[in-house]
Amino acid sequence: MKFAFCLFVISFVASSVVADDWPQWNGATRTGIYSESGTLRSIPSDGLKKLWSQPVHLGYSGPAVSKGRVFLTDYIRTSGEITNNAGGRDRLNGTERILCFDSKTGKELWNHQYDREYYLSYPSGPRATPTVDGDHVYTLGAEGDLICLTVADGKVVWKRQLKEDYRTETPMWGYAAPPLVVDDWLYTLAGGEGSLLVALDKRTGEERWRALSASSIGYCPPTMIHASGRDQLLLWDPANLNSLDPKTGTVLWSVPLAPRYEMSITPPVISGNRMYVSGIGEVAAMFEFEPNKLGVKELWRGKVKNALYCANSTPSFDGDYVYGADCGIGSMICFRASDGERQWETFAPTAGGDRRQAHGTAFLAKVGDLYYLLSETGDFIIAKLSPEKYEEIGRFHVLDATNTAFGREVVWSYPAYAHRCLFARNDKEIVCYSIAE
């Protein structure tokens, strides 16, 4: 008798969200899968049609799209110098904003803003993409301002100042993990002793439980899965990969996995019963969920010149292979899931050129048998990724790179795909292009 083992990522959004929305970071299921039909398989000869653009200010956060509205956060700097020094913080004064646009016309429908001092490394604006759930949108600012607003008019329902409430310090690179909403719960990284991860009532902001301690909270979004016969909430902190009971915060299992510089960033990616986690410093591991046992079995750990080590963008675990942008080398890499052996690498969809570029970045979205990529150079790319090769079908420049890192200009913001449109931002504008076939 064969045993069928099923592991799946839970849908993180309310049932009312339609299939062509992109209501939170990395899509409706936070897996980077875009399933809307009738979208481009190649770049038209005359390029993509721009539908609208609107001026915005500083921000690493990506757009979220839901029910005909686009949500974005930014920062208007009024004083202070941006040095983008990875080893030190810059102090800025300015205003953090939450913006809402009409997805068809780009018209600004409302905005909410508040004064906020920044003391961060790479301080160019908020990091976390808004999370839309039904009639509410939840945002997390770079210094820990967690706010619930109404989608219709931007009215504040409740707010928390995480750094103050949990008596902690903002991480070096800011609060960056987008809040996760499942059913009536909101999960967010907070900080402080015993409160690295907290669960709040999404309607009131009241705490339901708190869990975990670490030297820093890291930057990794919490992930909900169903494995070993139960729901599990995964959180990678700077020292361990943890699984918690979503209702109580009880730690179910924990395995050591410590990236350099406390940079636990990209969440685990899953294919079947296997799970891959990777970060800076050639820290990575492939795990397997066992059907009759709570926990994971370690299959292998990353070594020099194998696997893939991600930071800015999340890899794609596609069948028996994993694709993604390596933070150390800066190239896009494909490796075999069974043993980590690299199949190919290329700089074409990341920083371009043919030489090492630290944190070379491309944001991936799987679209049927193809991939859409947004390169750090501001190019929208359609490509076919296979174990044999990277096959670029076409590209079109949609945004100028307006930020800097390691001596080059970059776009480091996740895009959104919804209503057969591409939504992307830099530090000067948000743009909407048609990607209808």
Image: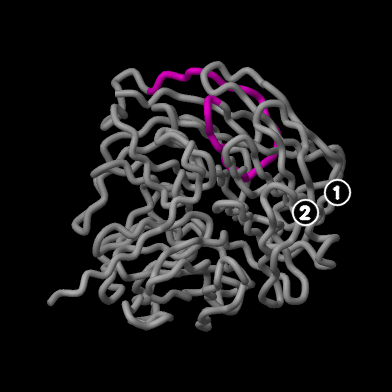
Q: Residues within 10 Å of mark 2 (few under 14, many from 20)?
A: many
**Please, what is the three-letter code of the amino acid marked with disc 1?**
Glu
* Viewer-nearest residue: 259 or 109: 109
Instruction: State which mark lies toward you, 2 or 1.
Output: 2
Q: Residues within 10 Å of mark 1 (few under 14, many from 20)?
A: some
- As for residue 19 lying within the magenta part, the answer is no
Residue underneath mark 2: 143
Query: How much space separates mark 2 and mark 1, taking CA atoms?
Result: 8 Å
- As for residue 51 lying within the magenta part, the answer is yes
Q: Residue 138 — which label?
A: none
* Viewer-nearest residue: 385 or 149: 149
Q: Position of residue 92 (x, y in %)?
A: 83, 48
Please indicate whether residue 246 sits to the left or right of residue 90 in the image: left
**Residue interval drawn in magenta:** 48-68
How many dots with numbers?
A: 2
From what the image shows, is residue 158 above or below residue 422?
A: below
* Viewer-nearest residue: 230 or 409: 230
Q: Earlier in the sequence, mark 2 or mark 1?
A: 1
Classify mark 1: helix, strand or loop. Answer: loop
Residue underneath mark 1: 117
Q: Position of residue 50 (x, y in %)?
A: 47, 19
The answer to whether the residues at label 2 and label 1 have Cβ atoms under 8 Å apart is: yes
Q: Classify the position of the N terminus by image quarter.
A: bottom left
Q: Position of residue 400 (x, y in %)?
A: 55, 33
Please indicate whether residue 43 sits to the left or right of residue 193 in the image: left
